[in-house]
Amino acid sequence: MSNALYILTIASFLLLCKKIISTFTLFKEFLSIVSQTNGLSLSDTIDLLLEEDGLSPDDQIQILEFRDLLQAFLINKVSIETLFNHSIGRVLFEFFKNFPISFAEKHIHLSGSLAPEFVWPRLKVLLEGVNGDAVLAKIREVYGKDVLIDSVESVQKLIELDDEGDFAKYLRILFLPKIVLNSYQAHREAAYFMAKDMYDKYNVASLTLKFTLSRSTKIKGEQVPGLENLTPDDVVLGLYDGYIDYQKENPKFRFTLSPSFRKELDFFDADLFDSKKIAFEAQVLYLVDFLKRHPHLKNVLCEVDTVGDEKSLYRKSHFEQMRTGFRKLQYLGFQVKSHHGETWKVLRKGIQAVDNAMNIWHIDTLEHGLSLGVNPNYYYHRILQEVISENMHGRPLEQGINLLEIEDMHGVPPQVLDKLKKGELLDDLQKQKLMKIKFHHAREMEHYQHDVLNRMINKKVGLVALPSSNLKLTGSLADHKDHPFSWWEKKGVKLGIGTDNYITLKTNFIQEMMILLFSEPNDLKITKLLMVATQEKNRAVISNALWQMRKAYIK
Ligand SMILES: [Zn+2]
């Protein structure tokens, strides 16, 4: 090594040491303030941190810089990634990672949460096996004929959703993880891998896993080769045994297995069953029978969920097919959870879907629930701005959410709708009329939202918030800051946090906590966030944990 290179290496090593020492000092300062103030908001904590005696000038600069960046983030001048990557962002990550009470991940799917390090070696075996050609052909069908799969990195590229990715792409790219989940043993190893990964990296020691009992389907795009012999028993027992394997290493680990059923009315095997109702009830009977055969799983196999495209499912009649099946499960002590209010054709139907899920299925927890959190005044005004702007440019209003929402507003004159569709200019009176109709529609939807949300609170129905998933997959939020978590928290909703699919969505549980904190730095208290993330209801327990943490790090 040349002298110059040697000096450069030493210099970068010293710089790294300085960075690590500085991060650790800041971590201790941050912990000291949070424990002494019992977890104020992030803004208040940072203000107090700046007033601390004995801060080095360097640390002071870091904190001031972060405070400015946080303000800039609130007015859309910097991205949330800038905050994650800042030294104070890393301090926050370490703070949550080392918090003495581990977190409860309330909503995670199996296929979107398997790391490429898990997927690649298993995929390699499949590609080199007897069905290798068929597997490769199917992969090419899904990812394109030039797809490259030869390493962990190449798999990572394929299973992570890029920034331009949408819901359709997201469903497609879950294919690779699904293909390796082909046996009891694969499920067992997947469960172990996932539990260990989430605890080691993100301090998660409790998880609620959503998974599909039976993946056999007649829908072509959903068919996965090599799964013909996989039974529901393989899936459930594999997952259970994998989690128990991990629990033996880490006794504080807890889990709930939540079989998830597709709710689309045409999603069932029509060769085997006459109706969706009969097909669903057969799965219910399977669960009942399974628990008779394996009663030791009763404490963890205790809830079910529904997934799938809900856009066309909002009327009472749409909930009838699965009604008696759920009732049977509820009588046996199962909790019913439901993915609802995540996506919608029009917002009114998104609220109605939640309303009916509560009234007809008697759900215990609502997963997503975004239709109860979007601000109707903002939502409809944005739509009207876009519609009017298009019209002023003489462009016809195309099929899509904006047209559907305008058509859903009560009292829009047919001639106004006709002009919008043809791209003929509205006159001032017609624009004003449309604005008034929008105003009243927004007010009615706001009423409806509050009515459903208040009933949810009264009935103690829980709500699991999934910030990254909602931003990346629904298209209903313009920014992380639009997520309604903080509003729900203030209203007293029983909340939980989930990542949905942390690998596919390139996030993790701690990052979701940081998103929530950065989005509401003035209102959301760190203690409140910790209570939701740990599911600890007793505030004093959180205070005590903060104090114990302080004792461990600050001598
Ligand atoms: Zn989900």
Image (spheres, helix red, strand yellow):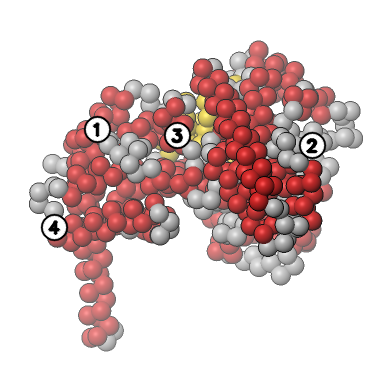
Q: How many angstroms separate mark 2 from mark 1 (CA)?
A: 50 Å
Q: How many angstroms separate mark 4 from mark 3 (CA)?
A: 37 Å
Q: Mark 2 points at which residue?
A: 267
Q: Name the residue under label 4.
A: 56
Q: Does the residue labelled 1 lie within 8 Å of ligand 1?
A: no
Horizontal placement of 528 versus 423: left or right?
A: left
Secondary structure beneath label 3: helix
Residue 321 position by quadrant: top right
Q: Which amino acid does label 3 sit on?
A: Trp
Q: Is mark 2 within 8 Å of ligand 1?
A: no
State yes or no: discs 1 and 4 in contact (Cβ < 8 Å): no
**Which residue is farthest left?**
54
Q: What residue type is labelled 4?
A: Ser
- Of the pair 394 and 344, the residue shown nearer to us: 394
Q: Position of residue 48 (x, y in %)?
A: 19, 44
Q: How many angstroms separate mark 4 from mark 2 (CA)?
A: 62 Å
**Relative height, residue 130 to residue 515 (above, below):** below
* Mark 2 or mark 1: whose residue is earlier in sequence: 1
**Relative height, residue 385 to residue 185 (above, below):** below
Q: Name the residue under label 3.
A: 487
